[in-house]
Image (spheres, rainbow, N blue to C red):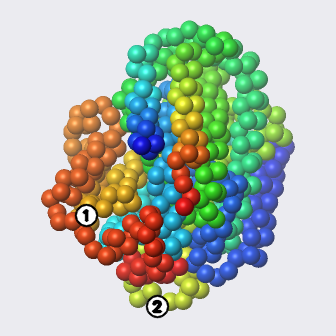
Amino acid sequence: MKLKVVYTLAVVLMLIRVDYWWWHEQLPLSFFGWMNAAMVYQIGIWLVGWLLVIYVARFVWKED
Amino acid sequence: MNAHVIIVTASIAAYMGIIILIGLSSARLSRWTMEDYHMGGREFRAFVLFSTIFGANISAVTLIGVPGGAYHLGWVMWPYFVTSWAWLTPLLFFVVGSRAWLLGKKRGYMTLGEVVGGRWRSPALAVLISLVLIFYTLPYLMTGLIAGGRILGALTDGYFPIWVGELVVALVVVTYLLLGGMRGAAWVNTFQTMVFLFGCLGIFLILASALGGPSEATRRIQEDFPALLSRANMSWQRFFSYGLIVGVSPVLFPQVFMRLLTGRDPKALKQMMIVFPAPAFFVMFLMAMVGMWGRAAIPGLEGAQSDNILPLLLVQYAPVWIMGVLGAAVFAAIMSTMDVQLLSVTTMITRDILSRSRLRHGTDRDMVRISRGLVIVLTVTAFVLALFNPLGIIRIVEFAFAGIACLLAPTIAALYWKRCTTQAAFWSILTSQFVLLALTFGWLPSELSFGFLPGLPAMAVGLLALVVVTFLTSQADDEGTEDYFNLFGTGEPSVAADPSVSKAGA
């Protein structure tokens, strides 16, 4: 079950990684004066992906 | 030779000297066995494992290709790589690596060909997989030499022609590989990965500061090159397809796959996997931003010329004494990938191909001697190819990564799908490779890619062929299959090497 959740989340993450709703948009540099919302969104994707990796290493991968 | 060239050359020479000394030290611990030369005795702990696997992932692409790509395409170059690779690759370390590691421990496997071929006891499949991997690893290997040549040339303001830098990289890598094999490469890579990580941070801080800080540098891009911020120069289809390719291919890179098998225990693999995403993100993020900012600072670079943007910025903005140190960081990234690429290709040639010839009667010592000879032959081949290659680094790796990514479906099937058949694995590889080559070289109309990179339709066709042929052919339901899968379950594992696939023995 845990594995199915992980694989589903990975697929969803790969799909929503393409933020096509902002693609080719000129967004304001609203964060720290040099980052726009699309950049922050991509950092969020990376962060969620990292949490998924930690979850797998801690709770899914059994060493037996 | 002016003072600038002398300081940069001396710094890089000192760095190369340290590398060779580490290689010499590791040689004292090396034994003349295939297991030690190619796998370092399979005893690396988490820190060394992380350094070597991360070092094998970080290559000329990071310090040359990514800034060069960002120069033309903008900030999108970091999510292009990192928002899939940084987490999807570690996930596959679990999916593929956990089972492959077990097979390595129990059956003495060293290569992907042995792991997949061993599943169906098919030496022909093992050879086919190794040939595919060698075919795509050679151009990737070549990018390291190209990058070395360009870096040395640019840092010394053109004093050294490109071939000199290529030759230096080739000679140093060959030297420590001949001395220490995998053990030497692992020791060197641990040092190199640290140099690289701190070097990257140094490069970013120095250049960001010299360009007026991140806000000012980005503002100039917004005014003069707004397309770099809106991702106007890249389609979402390319972004999606490369995300998949760059996320799934690294675990199958021979240089990474082999290193997954060198871990002492699963704990080392898990610790490495947890740490991996953080530095992966930061190096790509920092280098892409610097490359994009470089467009306003040094405009007018065309095509593959932009691969030089990082050294050009260093020459223009960094103090000369720091330039040599940072140049060493760039060489660290290049060599930490090249060394194990060479080692992995020689492993595949000796284990999967030569071990099926008359040479199989040779001793371990003979095979190690052959491996060392192959290191030299392969380096010379890559060196000659690099002299004539005009393509940008990113274009070379997109092609090579896609070819390797096409092997994911048969690999997963070998490790998890009992019903899958040998014929299905063969057809999956053959069809996907044909589609990739046909779309890349124009034998099929490019419209068939639907805007995606050729690697994506190739992977889809390979997966389809795997499933269809599996259900069209009869199931391989025998003791060998049960024995293979029992290794992953609670059943009694087999400890005997399969002689039909792993002829060189452990």
Which label is found at residue B361?
2
Residue B282 coordinates in the image, percent (x, y): 65, 35
Q: Residue at x 57, y 15 (%)?
A: A36
The first of marks 1 and 2 along the sequence is 2
Question: Is B183 left, or right, of B295 in this rendering?
Answer: right
Q: Is residue B57 visible?
A: yes
Say what amino acid the circle numbered 2 marks: His
As shown in the figure, which amino acid type bears the numbered disc 1? Thr
Task: Give the letter of the chain under mark 1.
Answer: B
In front: B264, or A64? A64
Instruction: Write down the residue under mark 1.
Output: B421
- List the single residue furthest toward the left: B472
Q: Position of residue A41 (x, y in %)?
A: 53, 21
Circle 2 Cα neighbour tier, 10 Å, few/some/many (<14 / 14–19 / ≥20): few
Q: Position of residue B275 (x, y in %)?
A: 65, 44
Chain name for mark 2: B
Note whether B313 is above or below A58 in the view shown.
above
Looking at the picture, tell me which residue is in the foreground, B87 or B246: B87
Which residue corresponds to the image point at 59% horizontal and 46% vertical from the top-left? Answer: A58
Per the rendering, the mark at residue B316 is: none
| Residue in the image at 25% along x and 64% along y | B421
Q: Nearer the viewer, mark 1 or mark 2?
A: 1
Q: Is residue B171 visible?
A: no
Circles 1 and 2: CB atoms closer than 8 Å:
no
Give the Cα separation between the discs numbered 1 and 2: 31 Å
